[in-house]
């Protein structure tokens, strides 16, 4: 029984860590959705209306960020967008690791150290997941000439 408990505990913690890393990109859209939804509820939209407005605003935030990141040719703009998405993920990662470290770690210094490392790891994961598919393309105004196919020399041209 003890071995089964340890195995399931390890599996549960591993699943939770995988979930945290997989959902790190969605920290900003979730924050926007909750903020807009609570504001709509406060202003009288009702439970269903606030939920719908919150979900739509979170989805639009995610879509706008990913679309702008994919379409933009400016490296500065891509870095700014990735930073805007990675910072809330790092903050969420800090708080999750700090809360989990309170279970076993007695020293506040070590809890803070683990939380800072967790924030860096989760923020870096969000950054990497956002920028992985955004490739740098040469801009048209930079004067980059693409490889154009050269005409094939035929036997008649070669003999002249």
Image (spheres, rainbow, N blue to C red):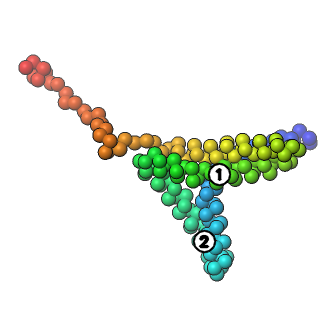
According to the picture, the residue beneath numbered tag 1 turns out to be: 89
Is disc 1 in contact with disc 2, using a CB cutoff of under 8 Å?
no
Q: Give the tally of numbered discs.
A: 2
In the rendered image, the residue lying farthest to the left is 160
Please report the residue visible at 62 percent of the width from the left and 65 percent of the height from the top.
33
Say which quadrant the C terminus sits in.
Answer: top left
In this rendering, position of residue 120 left or right of residue 68: right
Residue 77: which numbered mark, if any?
none
Say which quadrant the N terminus sits in.
Answer: top right
Please report the residue visible at 65 percent of the width from the left and 51 percent of the height from the top.
89
Please report the residue visible at 82 percent of the width from the left and 43 percent of the height from the top.
109
The picture places residue 155, in percent across and down from the top left corner, at 13, 21
The picture places residue 137, in percent across and down from the top left corner, at 40, 42
Residue 52: which numbered mark, if any?
2
Which SS class for mark 2?
helix
Tell me: residue 156, above or below residue 18: above
Quadrant in the picture for residue 36: bottom right
* Crowd class of label 2 (few under 14; some 14 to 19; many from 20; radius 10 Å): some
In this rendering, position of residue 135 left or right of residue 52: left
- State which tag comes first along the sequence, 1 or 2: 2
The picture places residue 114, in percent across and down from the top left corner, at 77, 42
The picture places residue 90, in percent across and down from the top left corner, at 66, 49
Circle nearer the viewer, 1 or 2: 1
């Amino acid at each position: 029984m003890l071995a089964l408990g340890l195995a399931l505990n390890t599996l549960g913690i591993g699943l939770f860590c995988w979930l945290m890393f997989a959902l790190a990109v969605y920290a900003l859209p979730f924050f926007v959705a909750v903020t807009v939804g609570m504001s709509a509820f406060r202003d009288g939209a009702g439970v269903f209306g606030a939920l719908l407005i919150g979900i739509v605003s979170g989805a639009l935030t995610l879509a706008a960020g990913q679309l702008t990141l994919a379409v933009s040719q400016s490296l500065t703009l891509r870095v700014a967008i990735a930073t805007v998405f990675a910072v809330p993920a790092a903050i969420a990662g800090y708080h999750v690791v700090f809360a989990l470290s309170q279970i076993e770690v007695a020293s506040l210094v070590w809890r803070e150290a683990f939380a800072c490392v967790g924030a860096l790891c989760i923020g870096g994961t969000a950054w990497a997941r956002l920028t992985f598919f955004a490739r740098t393309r040469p801009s048209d105004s930079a004067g980059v000439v693409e490889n154009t196919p050269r005409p094939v020399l035929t036997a008649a041209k070669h003999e002249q």
